[in-house]
Image (spheres, rainbow, N blue to C red):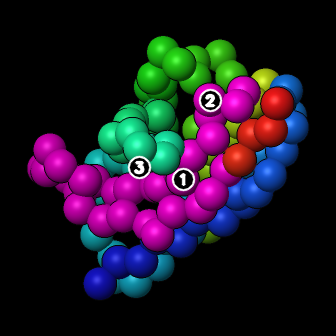
Amino acid sequence: QVQLVESGGGLVQAGGSLRLSCAASGRTFSRAAMGWFRQAPGKEREFVGVIMWSSENTYYAESVKGRFTISADKAKNTVYLQMNSLRPEDTAVYYCAARSAGNTMYDYWGQGTQVTVSS
């Protein structure tokens, strides 16, 4: 079993910053990518960004490009989401997810962490 635990959420004013962490534990698996997603109240879950585990290439949704940065500390088995210039519309529950090698879908999901941006 693989566990993903997010942390670092909270309340921040517009224009502020937060850094979310996603720590993976449990059984070892061949990881292709780690993604971040978010879900705002009344909305569907949406893609935020992803880091490819081998190359560490990153890709972002247009809505966060230039403001959010994903990084990984492989020694700690942890992925980070640095969020700068936060906006009220960034308010959501943020989830990290892991995709195994050879899979097109994300296999494992964290429980989510709440990010609230006040105007």
Distance CA(mark 3)–CA(mark 1) = 17 Å
Q: Examine the image and state in which quarter residue 117 appears.
A: top right
97 drawn magenta: yes
Q: Is residue 108 left or right of residue 48?
A: left
State the residue position of label 1: 93
The span picked out in magenta is: 87-115
Q: Residue at x 53, y 71 (%)?
A: 5
State the residue position of label 3: 34
Of the residues shown, which amino acid type is indicated by label 2? Glu
Q: Depth check: give the residue in front, 108 or 24.
A: 108
Furthest toward the front, the residue is 42
Foreground tag (3 vs 2): 2
Q: Residue at x 48, y 15 (%)?
A: 62
Q: Crowding near pointer 1: few (<14 within 10 Å), some, many (20+)?
A: some
Kindly check if marks 3 and 1 are in contact, taking CB atoms under 8 A apart as contact.
no
Q: Crowding near pointer 2: few (<14 within 10 Å), some, many (20+)?
A: few
Residue 105 against residue 9 in the figure, above or below: above
114 drawn magenta: yes
Q: Depth check: give the residue in front, 48 or 51.
A: 48
Q: Examine the image and state in which quarter residue 71 appears.
A: top right
Q: Which mark is residue 89?
A: 2
Q: Position of residue 96 (x, y in %)?
A: 46, 55
Of the residues shown, which amino acid type is indicated by label 1? Val
Residue 98 against residue 19 in the figure, above or below: below
Dot 3 or dot 1, earlier in sequence: 3
Dot 3 or dot 2, earlier in sequence: 3
Of the residues shown, which amino acid type is indicated by label 3? Met
